[in-house]
Amino acid sequence: MRLTSASLLFTLLVSSLSPAQGVLEAYNTDLKCECVQETANYIPIRFIDRLQIVPPGNGCPKREVIVWLKTKIAVCVKPHAKWLQKLIQILQKKTMLSTPPAPVI
């Protein structure tokens, strides 16, 4: 009798874990985000080596911007920081101007 009570309790416990796991996944959607903490502080352009923009997806619901410094340190920056938006605009204009025109056939 004691063994069947324990097995019944174990079966109930295991069957109740599946929905709970789905709830935990719904609340912890940022488990795969690369940025744990973001800053809006200005970083001078002379210190920036490259800029990486990670779109939402793969378990992370938000867009992430990672600034790689010349000292090989990665800094997560808030995507809506005004200085960052201006930097992105400047870089987009620069790449559009430096890209050679496509050949016309």
Image (cartoon, helix red, strand yellow):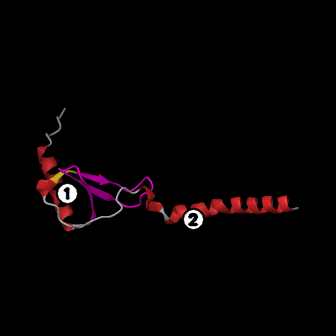
Outermost residue on the top side: it is 105
Check residue 88 in the rendering and tell me which mark sits there, or answer none.
Answer: 1
Which residue occupies 53% across, 61% down? Answer: 25
Locate the C terminus by quadrant: top left
Is residue 58 one of those drawn in magenta?
Answer: yes
Residue tagged by mark 2? 23
Which residue occupies 22% across, 49% down? Answer: 72
Q: Quadrant of residue 10?
A: bottom right
Kind of residue indicated by mark 2: Val
Check residue 38 in the rendering and tell me which mark sits there, or answer none.
Answer: none
Give the CA separation, mark 2 to mark 1. Answer: 37 Å
SS category of the residue bearing label 2: helix
Q: Residue 2, image x and y in percent? A: 85, 62
Locate the N terminus by quadrant: bottom right
Residue closest to the eye, 92 or 77: 77
Q: Tell which circle, 2 or 1, labels the residue nearer the N-terminal end.
A: 2
Q: Residue 29, image x and y in percent? A: 47, 61
Neighbour tally class for label 1: few under 14, some 14-19, many 20 plus, Cα within 10 Å:
few
- State which region is magenta: 51-80
